[in-house]
Image (cartoon, helix red, strand yellow):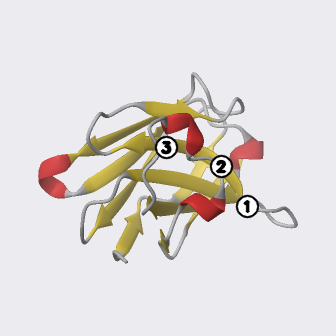
Amino acid sequence: QVQLVESGGGVVQAGGSLRLSCETSGLTYAMGWFRQAPGKEREFVSVIMWSAGSTYYADSVKGRFTISRDNAKNTVYLQMNSLKTEDTAVYYCAAGGIYYASVRSYTSEADFSSWGQGTQVTVSS
């Protein structure tokens, strides 16, 4: 298992932007972001394959969020633009220890073996 350290959460007004970072202690096949809003189950947000750089997004964030990676820094980012109040949640990064040929396969919590501690994102109206 790898260790993951997240940063970058905070409070922002609707329409604003935030960038989350997730530093990993080692390389994995894929890195994902999930979120959990109060009273709701954790849900998939986005994923990126370390080697190919291919990405996949949940429909709710497509066109507003961008996932990227810096191989030299072992860090994955989630750039969140045009934030909405419904984006308010604790955001978790996760490392995928299972290899799938398609990035679209990494959408379930079961596909990820290591998790960060979570960072709070609050979007105010």
Compute the Cα span from label 1 to label 2: 7 Å
Considering the image in quadrants, where does the N terminus appear?
A: bottom left
Which kind of residue does numbered mark 1 sit on?
A: Arg
Q: Measuring 48% from the left and 62% from the top, which residue is drawn there?
A: 94
Residue 42 numbered mark, or none? 1
Compute the Cα span from label 1 to label 3: 15 Å
Q: Secondary structure at mark 1?
A: loop
Where does label 3 land, which residue? 47
Q: Is residue 10 above or below residue 67?
A: below
Between residue 6 and residue 107, name the one nearer to us.
107
Residues marked 3 and 2 touching at CB (< 8 Å): yes
Q: Position of residue 116 (x, y in %)?
A: 47, 72
Which kind of residue does numbered mark 2 sit on?
A: Phe
Q: Measuring 53% from the left and 52% from the top, which residue is drawn there?
A: 33
Q: Is residue 89 left or right of residue 77?
A: right
Between residue 108 and residue 13, name the one nearer to us.
108
Q: Is residue 113 left or right of residue 39?
A: left
Q: In which image quadrant can residue 6 be found?
A: bottom left
Residue 117 numbered mark, or none? none
Q: Is residue 42 left or right of residue 47?
A: right
Residue 44 numbered mark, or none? 2
Considering the image in quadrants, where does the C terminus appear?
A: top right
Q: Residue 72, can we see it?
A: yes
Q: Residues within 10 Å of mark 3 (few under 14, many from 20)?
A: many
Q: Residue furthest top?
A: 63
